[in-house]
Image: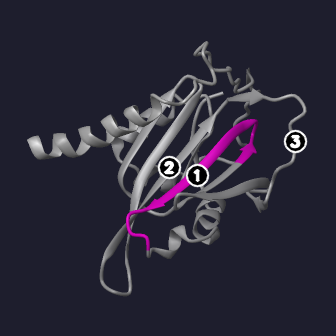
Amino acid sequence: MPRALVIVFVPVVLLTGGCADRERRDASGEVPSVSAGKLAKSNVTMPHEGKDLDVLAKLPASERAKIGESFVPVLVPRVPADRVHVVVEPGFFAYSGTIAKTLPDGRVSLATIAVQGTRFAHEHEGFPMDVSTHAMRGTRGMFTINEGIATTTWVEHGAGYSVDVECSIGDDTRCHDEAFVLELTQGLAFVGGRP
């Protein structure tokens, strides 16, 4: 234990000592604020198509019970997942689950799937309105990949949605490009919510 403390402590001492000779550029210590923009509540509508009762029935009963309280239409993957968890709050819902895949070398990789929907959005004046990269779910949305996490975002029925896929093993091709996250996004099922 003391050895670990020395390893961590020495670089901190060297770093602080090396800074003592430098002139401070910002003597006031103030950091300029950054705004996420004005938060606005969107007009959300429920989908005209009915709930996918087959997908809803496959969710764990404890998680299924929460869905009817959401003010945002709840979309979940049609693909069965393990470790499913649903959170419903007044302005958003969040779903998470894992989908296992055996890689060619025999290792099992878990893709953690997160789906979020919100009725709130930050408004930014002068920000380009269309930053879409792909067609998805009958509209345009954006795909990004950052630190190995593949993400789609779009607006549907007035709510903002995102799907994130993070793989437990770097060799899992589900997180190498947009193919898997777009397929998952396109196949999301509406399972409930209230107006």
* Residue 53 in magenta stretch: no
- In the image, is residue 72 above or below residue 174? above
The residue nearer to you, when weighing 169 against 99, is: 169
In the displayed structure image, the side of residue 144 where residue 78 appears, left or right:
left
Residue occupying image coordinates x 32% and y 42%: 11
Q: Earlier along the polypeptide chain: callout 2 or callout 3?
A: 2
SS type, badge 1: strand
Which amino acid type is marked by label 1?
Val
Residue occupying image coordinates x 54% and y 47%: 115
- Magenta range: 154-170
C-alpha span from label 2 to label 3: 25 Å
- In the rendered image, the residue lying farthest to the front is 21
- Can residue 1 be seen here? no
Q: Measured from the top left, where is residue 22 in percent x and y?
A: 53, 30
Q: Which residue matches tag 3?
A: 129
Q: Which mark is residue 163?
A: 1
C-alpha span from label 3 to label 1: 20 Å
The residue nearer to you, when weighing 168 against 102, is: 168
